Image (tube, rainbow, N blue to C red):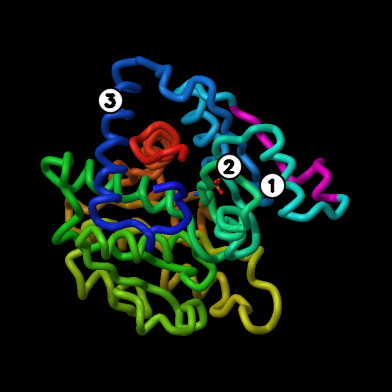
Amino acid sequence: MRHLLSTQDLSRDDAILILDTAGQMAATQEREVRKLPTLRGKTVVNLFFEDSTRTRISFEAAAKRLSADVINFSAKGSSVSKGESLKDTALTLQAMGADAVVVRHWASGAAYQLAHGGWLHGSVLNAGDGTHQHPTQALLDAFTMRRHLVGSPEGAGLDGLTVAIVGDVLHSRVARSNVQLLHTLGAKVVLVAPPTLVPVGIARWPCDVVHTLDEAIEGYDIDALMMLRVQRERMTGGGSAFFPSPEEYTRLFGLDGDRLGRLPEHAIVMHPGPMNRGLEISAEAADSPRSVIVEQVGNGVAVRMAALYLLLAGEEGAQ
Ligand code: CP
């Protein structure tokens, strides 16, 4: 594996190797072996054209804990604001000797373009491209589910689990990445969304689709309930107007204390963040003992350490 662009590119064995490696990385962190020498001499560039808190910071922490040199590049305040293209930005990074580029971009396909444009020699890790993919988010979600819901994680998939993903599927790279990865790992996926917030072609996705959260809670034995952020910043233009109203959305799709109480006792509550508290999730649900939302963030560091390690130091890495 040279790049990590999409969960669609991952075989079951690839995904389990990343999750197992992340488990080993997490164990080093739990033993307080904070820094491993594995990527000493390598340079990782964080190239962010869109805002991020969790992904950017955890990629930086992951690279530093593997002893890589890290360069943080934000489009704001760079020559991108003077009109510099993705190609010229990439050529500049190549000239500076980047071994890996972690890219977040508002355009779907930007990470693929960077990986296959012939401008970079190193690996590209997709940290979220438009509404398309966010593979490390799906991997950290799978890692979190496996730890909580599967008895003996090493080597295991998510076979037999039922995961409901709720909300603004239309704009969600997290939903796309998760549906593919969860299917690869053997879980059943139920998408819960208003008809106005599901993508064209969803009938071909390997999942069920229902149109209220109550329908999902009554109809499925849910092991993990993943709430999605309503992405109001992407709801511009008539084609993607936010319908129903925020109040109606909360009534039909919001996770509150009552719905939380109707989930199976073992079910966990997830959210990729950032959350719109009071819209898709209440404070009671977000802060409940069944919420693993903060743990997801922590697991992101181990999963990103695993991805960087496997791409840059693994047998086939850094070709
Ligand atoms: N989940 C996620 O991608 O969060 P950030 O936008 O803060 O990176």
Residue 23 in the image: above or below residue 138: above
Dot 1 amino acid type: Ala
Residue range of the region highlighted in magenta in the rendering:
70-81
In the picture, measured across the screen, residue 106 lies left or right of residue 67, that is right
79, 262: nearer the viewer: 79
Q: State if disc 3 and disc 1 touch (CB < 8 Å).
A: no
Measuring from the top left, give residue 289's x and y in whole percent. Answer: 30, 41
C-alpha separation, residue under disc 1 versus residue under disc 3: 35 Å
Residue carrying label 3: 27
Residue carrying label 2: 101
Q: Residue furthest right?
A: 82
Measuring from the top left, give residue 148's x and y in whole percent. Answer: 22, 43
200, 279: nearer the viewer: 200
Mark 2 close to ligand 1, CB under 8 Å: no
Measuring from the top left, give residue 82's x and y in whole percent. Answer: 88, 50
Helix, strand or loop status at disc 3: helix
Helix, strand or loop status at disc 1: helix
C-alpha separation, residue under disc 3 versus residue under disc 2: 26 Å
Dot 2 amino acid type: Val
Residue carrying label 1: 90
Q: Is residue 23 magenta?
A: no
- The residue positioned 23% from the left and 58% from the top of the image is 185
